[in-house]
Image (spheres, rainbow, N blue to C red):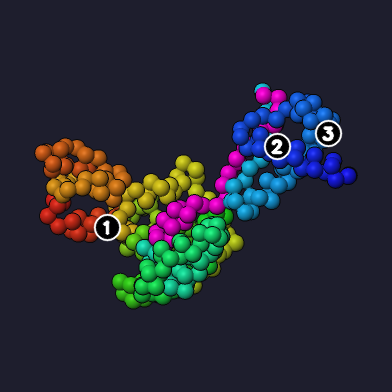
Amino acid sequence: MNEDLKNDQISRVLQLYAKLSDGYVVNKAEEAARYGVNERSIQRDIDHIRNFLDEDSERTGIVNSIVYDRMAKGYKLETLYKIWLQNSEVLALCKILLDSRAFTKDEMVEMLDKLITCCVPKINQQRVKDLIRNEEFHYVEPRHKTKFINTMWDLGQAINEARYIEIDYYRTKDKKTVHRKLQPVALMFSEYYFYLTAFIEDEEVKKDFDVLNDSFPTIYRIDRIKSLQVLDKRFHIPYSSRFEEGEFRKRIQFMYGGKLQRVKFRYTGTDIDAILDRLPTAQILDDENGAYVVSAEVFGSGIDMWIRSQGDDVQLIQ
């Protein structure tokens, strides 16, 4: 290809790219006539633009593609998805991670660095780091100082494959380590800690439960799991009886076990929205000049702790 032809092709590709970027449809026959070339040349130009977009996605974090629109009888540029989070989104996630206080300081620093490096364009990485530097420096790690991320992943695999597990679990009420064979069903996070929810089959153990034949699983703090073995044996829970993590999460406070119940209370504080956010199943039954009567379906004894924490703003209605 001589220099003039090469320059003509470069100019043509740039003009086609500009046209696509402006939202216009490129028709091969029309463009071939416009530039005095055959349609195969225009197709090669489009392929060059496609290759450029594929390579440029690594720089911009945006995956664009040229697709054929049958109705418009031509090619157009579409943004398929964005592979990078926005700077503000990464900052928000970093703040949430720091506030969770769920991990050791070494783990937290490593995760924050990876999140910023992988998800923020290089030009903005230092700015995000500056915004979290003070909070990261003063980060207070949990007192258990346990690294459990790999254990949590193994539990997730067992849940996904419906495999029984056996654990040695440190129980704080009597300072003993107990052995349990479980059907794991969900991983959850609440108030600084990650939890495993699982069904237990041992009738000898279950006889001490507050609620016999409870349809809800027992709850284990993952950092207190001293050993874990994932068994080859699988369990089966009928679809109609499956554990719905989202529904369970709406009804539990502080991850305390116990029976499913309905509570009714009067709220006289200044922010009813905070109450409704805290108790997703809550319903306002009455508004008595700013004193709200609220009913909520909850699971476990954690609701008692929450009510006591609200002081005079919440009065339980018997």
- The circle drawn on residue 302 is 1
Q: Which residue is mark 3?
A: 40
Q: Nearer the viewer, mark 1 or mark 2?
A: 2
Q: Residue at x 50, y 69 (%)?
A: 110
Nearer to me, 91 or 248: 91
Q: Amino acid at mark 2?
A: Gln
**Where in the figure is residue 15, as x and y percent of width and height?**
70, 37
- Left or right, residue 297 beside residue 179: left
Q: Is residue 81 in view from this perspective?
A: yes
Q: Quadrant of residue 145?
A: bottom left
Nearer to me, 316 or 177: 316
Q: Which residues are magenta?
A: 72-97
Q: Is residue 127 above or below residue 274?
A: below
Q: Amino acid at mark 3?
A: Arg
Q: Residue at x 77, y 27 (%)?
A: 34
- Left or right, residue 312 beside residue 27: left
